[in-house]
Image (tube, helix red, strand yellow):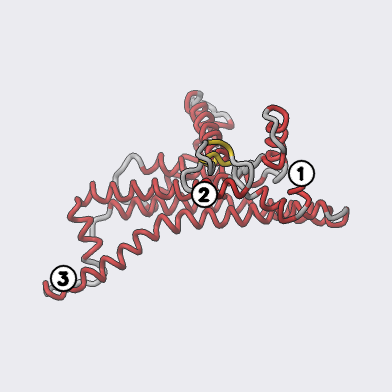
Amino acid sequence: MASEALTTTGYIKHHLQNWTYGQHADGHWGMAHSVAEAKAMGFMSIHIDTMLWSLVLGGIFLWYFRKAAVKATVGTPGGLQNFVEWIAEFIDSSVRGSFTGKNPLVAPMAMTIFIWVFLMNLMDLFPVDWLPSAAGWVGSTFFGLESHHVYFRVVPTADPNATIGMALAVFGLMIFYSIKVKGFSGFTAELTLHPFHSHNKIVMAFLIPFNFFLEFVSLIAKPVSLSLRLFGNMYAGEMIFILIAIMFSAGMTMGVLGSVLQMGWAIFHILIITLQAFIFMTLTIVYMDMAHSEH
């Protein structure tokens, strides 16, 4: 990187900035060449690195699992088939333990969420400079860009746009099946007749606004907590790796200490990325069960 990389603040800002495409102040569309330009593009901008890695990792997941399905045999299974069957059994037991309704969509959705989120989280274990440096080399070699203008984040789940997008998809399915299973009147009743109830119609009419406020807040909190929990954990993990990477520029002693800290944090982070994928999957199953449950 250029002069921006000479300071710790510039280094951190560079690694926390997404590769952004959007509309510039003069009206034309293109890539952002600075943090300020990316910020000025606003809501309609697209984080290309988040989209790219999400699609690539999703494609890898589909390719490997399809390969295992095509080559599946009733005889002695290979390593890939054993792994996929183990994942399938794990997902199946999780769904059976948390979902009481009948919906053939839930188990495949749970598997997709778990594997996809896990793979996106796993990108956090790549050394923080490897892939961004490679992107900077490609940008400067083939597109004539200065390397400090090439932004490239490789952890999609450290981008709130990705986690909020997934949470909203789950939330949309939850609302859809709530109305489908219970009917619009049943769904409305859940939002207005609980938790306070009275057999007196006048009192019940008085309680409806309070019930709606409490239930609506609880409903909206689901996608918010689902998305921000994953984002917060992965963003914090990414930040710690960046701070450890800065130690390598502070001399040999700090570099050796940084190596030890990096290894220790990476080993601990394996638990975090797995746990966050499991939590996102489990909450999705629970929310789908709530959508199918009639009170």
Q: Which residue is mark 2?
A: 277
Q: Nearer the viewer, residue 32 or 58?
A: 32
Q: Tell me the residue at 39%/50% (across/down).
A: 285
Q: Earlier in the sequence, mark 2 or mark 3?
A: 3
- Furthest residue toward left: 201
* Mark 3 residue element: helix
**Residue 63, percent across and down?**
52, 28
Q: Nearer the viewer, residue 280 or 7?
A: 7
Is residue 115 visible to the viewer in this orientation of the structure?
no
Distance between the alpha carbons at the discs numbered 1 and 3 = 66 Å
- Furthest residue toward front: 26
**Residue 182, percent across and down?**
21, 52
Label 1 Cα neighbours within 10 Å, binned few <14 / some 14-19 / many ≥20: few
Q: Nearer the viewer, residue 218 or 18?
A: 18
* Mark 2 residue element: helix
Is residue 153 visible to the viewer in this orientation of the structure?
yes
Label 2 Cα neighbours within 10 Å, binned few <14 / some 14-19 / many ≥20: many
Tell me: 284 left or right of 34. Answer: left
Quarter holding the C terminus is bottom left
Disc 1 residue type? Ala
Quarter holding the N terminus is top right
Q: Earlier in the sequence, mark 2 or mark 1?
A: 1
Residue 206 position by quadrant: bottom left
**Residue 126, percent across and down?**
68, 43
Q: Tell me the residue at 39%/60% (across/down).
A: 221
Q: Which residue is mark 1?
A: 2
**Residue 159, percent across and down?**
55, 49
Q: Which residue is mark 3?
A: 205
- Furthest residue toward right: 252
* Mark 1 residue element: loop
Disc 2 residue type? Ala
